[in-house]
Image (cartoon, rainbow, N blue to C red):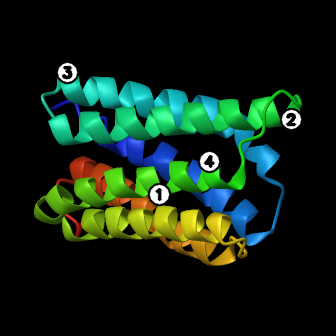
Amino acid sequence: MKLNASYLGLAAFALTTFVLSLANIGVMKDAIVLSLAFFYGGLAQFIAGMWSFRAEDNFGGTAFSSYGSFWFAFGFMELLKILNIYEPSSVELAVMMIAWGIFTFYMWIPSIKIGKILSLVFLTLWLTFFVLGASILFNFTLALGGSIGLICAFLAWYVSAAGLAGEIYHKKLLW
């Protein structure tokens, strides 16, 4: 069986994005994401990225290592905020979100060739980043960005589950 770390990477991304998106909608506080950001969204995704590079999957390696690093940075930023050491300004946070949106936009382009549902993951993710960035910059609610993030999380879970189930049952599912 060929090494495929994408199922782990997508699952880690989906769960952490799901929880943060619920916080952005206002269902819970965002501090709950801290442990997920460091361990599942951060560490598990970063490791999945390194394993993807080892399996000669440059797209997966770049995506998972980058988004794992995003979660480490996000978790560290939340920790600094909780400890009253540093809290980014709304402009700094908006620029960070928009910059991640730019990265995700260019990752979306090759994802179109990889799979239809996977390309929807990247489409909804770059929309999430841009909407969150604009919402922060213009002092709007984060609920729209959170809602798009929830869609993104469910799509990522689907791609992870479809790939893993397809491998186990030897049937290619739509992804």
In the picture of the structure, the residue carrying the numbered disc 2 is 82
Foreground mark, 3 or 2, reads 2
Q: Is residue 112 visible?
A: yes
Q: Which amino acid does label 2 sit on?
A: Ile
Residue depth check, mark 2 versus mark 1: number of the one nearer the observer: 1
Q: Is residue 32 above or below residue 75?
A: below
Q: Callout 1 environment at 10 Å: few (<14), some (14 to 19), or many (20+)?
A: many
Residue 8 visible to an observer of this rendering: no
Q: Mark 3 points at which residue?
A: 54
Marks 1/3 in contact by CB < 8 Å: the verdict is no
Q: Quadrant of the C terminus?
A: bottom left
Report whether 51 appears left or right of 74. Answer: left
- First in sequence: mark 3 vs mark 4: 3
SS of the residue under disc 4: helix
Q: Which of marks 1 and 3 is nearer the N terminus?
A: 3
Q: Quadrant of residue 47?
A: top left
Question: Mark 3 vs mark 2: which is more N-terminal?
Answer: 3
Number of numbered callouts drawn = 4
- Cα–Cα span, label 1 and label 3: 30 Å
Q: Residue 98 carries which label?
A: 1
In this rendered view, identify the residue nearer to me: 61 or 138. 138
Q: Which amino acid does label 4 sit on?
A: Glu
Q: Which quarter of the picture shows residue 21?
A: bottom right
Could you say where residue 69 lies in the image, as x and y percent from the top left? Answer: 47, 32
Horizontal arrangement in the rendering, residue 36 relative to residue 103 (left or right): right
